[in-house]
Image (tube, rainbow, N blue to C red):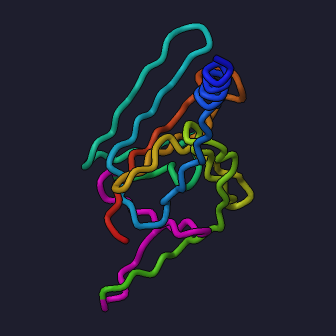
């Protein structure tokens, strides 16, 4: 009888343990094209309005700054490797690409499989921060951390970017 009670206690110990899950490894490295932009504008007192820009649309936001102030959806390309984010590609004629603007970035607060963290980089004295919403084999979804075009008065604008991988 003592053996049965002992086995039940030991079995209960193994079943009551919390399962630890490692944070997923981000696979940000690659070349992407911006396939969709969603601009969500939220007023403090009323609901939100969403504008969706699909391939062929020209997204212009005079209130925002580079790199998402002027985007040709379906044509604008970005490149990320393990520490550099690159913009404005130029073909060198022999199959390669030279990127005109490159900035060092860091991934911050990537602590679990449920929170992929943020991409943070500095452009012309301004810090850009994008929340990583999803990182899949062929796509990447980022969201800005917010923009108040009228100094915390008026709408908060969030921009969500859906990027599709086009290169290694």
In the image, is residue 83 part of the stretch drawn in magenta?
yes
In the image, is residue 85 part of the stretch drawn in magenta?
yes
Going by the image, does 135 lie left or right of 55? right
For the point 33% across and 39% down, the residue is 53
Residue 143 coordinates in the image, percent (x, y) = 52, 40
For the point 62% across and 26% down, the residue is 7
Residue 136 coordinates in the image, percent (x, y) = 40, 50
Going by the image, does 108 lie left or right of 61? right
For the point 37% across and 87% down, the residue is 92
Quarter occupied by the N terminus? top right
Q: Is residue 24 above or below residue 6?
A: below
Q: Is residue 155 above or below residue 26?
A: above
Residue 110 coordinates in the image, percent (x, y) = 64, 47
Quarter occupied by the C terminus? bottom left
Residue 6 coordinates in the image, percent (x, y) = 67, 24
User: Residues in magenta?
Assistant: 73-94
For the point 53% across and 56% down, the residue is 26
Q: Quadrant of residue 44?
A: top right
For the question of whether residue 149 can be seen, the reply is no
Outermost residue on the top side: it is: 45
Q: Is residue 93 above or below residue 44?
A: below
């Amino acid at each position: 009888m003592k053996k049965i009670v002992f086995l039940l206690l030991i079995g209960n110990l193994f079943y009551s343990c919390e399962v630890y899950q490692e944070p997923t490894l981000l696979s940000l490295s690659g070349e992407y094209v911006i396939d969709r932009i969603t601009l969500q504008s939220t007023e403090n007192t009323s609901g939100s309005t969403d504008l969706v820009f699909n391939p062929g649309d020209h997204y212009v936001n005079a209130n925002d700054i580079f790199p998402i102030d002027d985007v040709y959806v379906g044509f604008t390309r970005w490149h990320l490797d393990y520490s550099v984010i690159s913009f404005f590609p130029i073909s060198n004629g022999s199959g390669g690409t030279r990127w005109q603007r490159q900035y060092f970035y860091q991934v911050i607060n990537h602590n679990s499989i449920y929170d992929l963290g943020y991409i943070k980089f500095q452009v012309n004295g301004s810090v850009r921060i994008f929340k990583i919403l999803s990182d899949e084999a062929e796509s990447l979804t980022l969201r800005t951390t917010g923009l108040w075009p009228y100094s915390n008065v008026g709408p908060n604008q969030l921009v969500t970017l859906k990027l599709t991988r086009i290169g290694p």
